[in-house]
Amino acid sequence: MKPDPKIRAVARPIRIAFLIEDGPDSHKWLDSIFGSCFSRHGGRQSLVIPVEGGVIQDRYANWLRVLDPDLVITLTYDNPAYTGPLTNLLADSKIISQDRNRDVPEAHPRVFHDPQGLTALSWLPFLKASAGGFRRRPELILDSYLPWIDDGFMRDNFGSLATSLQQFPVHQELIDFVRPLLLTPHDAPEDRWRFGITGQEEIIDPYEILPRLRGNGGLLTLGYLSNLYSQSLRVEHSWNRSFCIVVGDSFLDRVTCWNAALLYDDAQHQGFKTLRIPTLAIRNEEVIRRLGEFLGTSNWIGQNNCPARVTVRSHSLIQSELNTIATQLNESSRQMVDAVVIQSPEDCCPVRDADMHKTRSNELGTTQVVSSEGCTVVAVPLPMQVKHCVGVHPLFSKGEWYVDLDIDRINDNREAENIRESWVLPNDPQLVSAFHTQRPARILSSGQIGVRVNCETSTLEINQPDDERIFRSILHESAHFDANDLRRGTQPEPVYKYSAPSDKGRYLQGVIGMFGTLESAEKILGGHFWRTQFENLAVPAKDQQDWVITFLQRRLNARSGSHIISDEAGWHQLAEKVIQSTQQLKQPRITVRYGSLLKAWEVELKAAVDEDQQLRQGQEEDPQEVRAELNRSLESLCRRGVFHRGHEWVCHKCSHTNWASIDSLRNTLPCEICQNTHQLPVDLTLCFRLNEFLAACIREHDTLTVIWALTALRERARRSFVYSPQMSLYCDFPENQGMKVDRELDVLCIVDGQFVIGEAKQRADQITNLEIEGLAKAAIDLNANIAVLAVLFDDSRCLDVKVARLRDLLPTGIEARGILSDWNVGHSYYL
């Protein structure tokens, strides 16, 4: 029995990434970006990507794709140029443009974005409540008086309330939790406390905060608060094996140092792992001394029975200058200090996708509820710190966060009985509305759904759509974006307005309905014994192909292997010869006696034993067990309606073959033609009659091939598999185009969030160039992820040629694959 379907909800911070191009006002834009990030819970984990000329460097592109931000803000001189690359790179991320003009630098740049994330100040009530033991109660929070001028040390590493929250002062609301530590200029006015600030402390030199940051607690900074329980990726990188100090004031120095912090874990265990030091400040011996003392008491990275490690890096300084700084820090910190020049902006990027592992902290808040058909109400999980904000000033719970939903499928196709598959969706933003409509939501790169919530959102209503609804949305609906989203207007109208299961699709639905599930159909039809019996009953002439070819070649004088039909008479001649050949073909016989099946099973079992050395070494099969296994399998097939039991006889008067089901048997039965009575024999032996619907599917509609193709794709799925029967696609509504079908697809399915379409044939040589071109066109029209050619019987060489032809017709973003049957062609040892 499968477990009950569930919906699991996990709270997490909003993820934001920035694209920024270097220019005259870049440093002011970086100030605004960093200030905005420090104001948000999880904001310190925001990725800042340096770009130029419409190009995102490869390693940054991979980092951005794996990070899967909810929002991307472009701050370049040609934002529309990045729309295409970002759309192809990301899942359903909102892309916001903030225009810049190289000739007119922005005097007071400010980053605007919606949504506004949950404030980093939301941690203050939690830190106060959890103080004690090894955690000191927070006493001060870093801020700056308005006229105070920073050299970059504070705004790049720690942030301040005034620069991040865009308001001054806010200390009256914070007084129950922390007092302000204000950075104040030398010439600050005497009446500066008219703002009503109380309990403040003041310093002039920002480097005086380093001794106060030692230990766990005491002085808080927004840089610390915005990095608590917020890590979305665990990264393997050479940089995170030591504390990273970046010295320099260039654009790349600042961006590189910011992104380096994303390589480490968050601030739970060590508050800071990176620092940027301005060039002028690092030449001050007092700054070196304070920095060394800070590292000596607050850095444990790389400490393994030896001193902790520190690496000094820079893009703007040369190696000799870095060596001097490293020597000075080594003396003051008593730690192992290296010096490395930053050669490229990509030096701080993870090298491979495999170096980035997604993380999820259960401490952030989770809920779980049993799902049902229709609508399920899910309680919104609160981030762990928000639970402590109840009853305090609304400032602490201001902003929004995301709830990621893992939704189990009710009607799944998972083979394992103890595991239920979940919904993993392709990157089609319009699919979100099938699950949730009340709150802003998006599809994540994982194929799950993320819903944006705030403290006023207590519950979410989540729907369970059927598979037909999902495929209808993929085939015929386009996404709608907000007015300020760069993706707006980039989505083409759907090529196909209408679709319906084709004749073959309806037969496939019938066969799967007969067996119960796709898995059950595959278990029976994939076994050599029953598949052979069904084909012998439904298509007894399948072994006469060579004879038919020889017959037509001889009768049409085409022994050289070619025959050209150039007129109507030629077609009539071909039709006549085909009709003549059918008279000599074996006709379907859809009934079989139990004795014949038992004899065939004994032969099959003996052949299986002969083929397998281990079976030959085992004990001989018990005849009673052989019969019992066949009986169990036959009973199952009869219950499913694959076989019907009854009595077959030939009328002695008119020679008509009659059939009577087991339910209609009586002592005398009339002939269906002449009504002559037939007496049931005393030693009556029942026959098994193959379901005519199944026989027609095997004989005429190639249903076996499509069932195999779907099961082959299902076996490749790790988390989710959703399929559709064969579909007929129409560019306009059928009645408007004379019911003419524009495209037919044998395979439509979603495999772990990848939308797959394909063509399925028994042999590769049956796939024509016209069908390959049609599949490629459909894959482009439907924005499929994968196009497959599935072949039931053939060698791989012919299939490889067809797949290569398909690959040539597809754009880079669509993968071409070939699948060759792995169904058991050896004899069956069990049923």
Image (cartoon, rainbow, N blue to C red):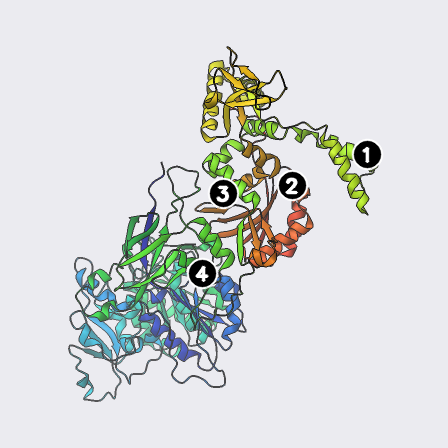
Label 4: which secondary element: helix
Seen from the viewer's position, the closer of residues 703 and 16 is 703
Instruction: Give the spatial CA distance, label 3 vs label 4.
Output: 24 Å
The answer to whether residue 814 shows anywhere in this view is no
Q: Amino acid at mark 3?
A: Arg
The residue at the point 29 percent across, 54 percent down is 378
Instruction: Give the spatial CA distance, label 1 vs label 3.
Output: 46 Å
Label 1: which secondary element: helix
Q: Amino acid at mark 4?
A: Pro
Tag shown at residue 714: 3
178 shown above or below 307: below
Look at mark 1 in the image and give the residue it sits on: 555
The earlier-in-sequence mark between 1 and 2 is: 1
The N terminus appears in which quarter of the rendering? top left
Seen from the viewer's position, the closer of residues 70 and 169 is 70
The earlier-in-sequence mark between 3 and 4 is: 4
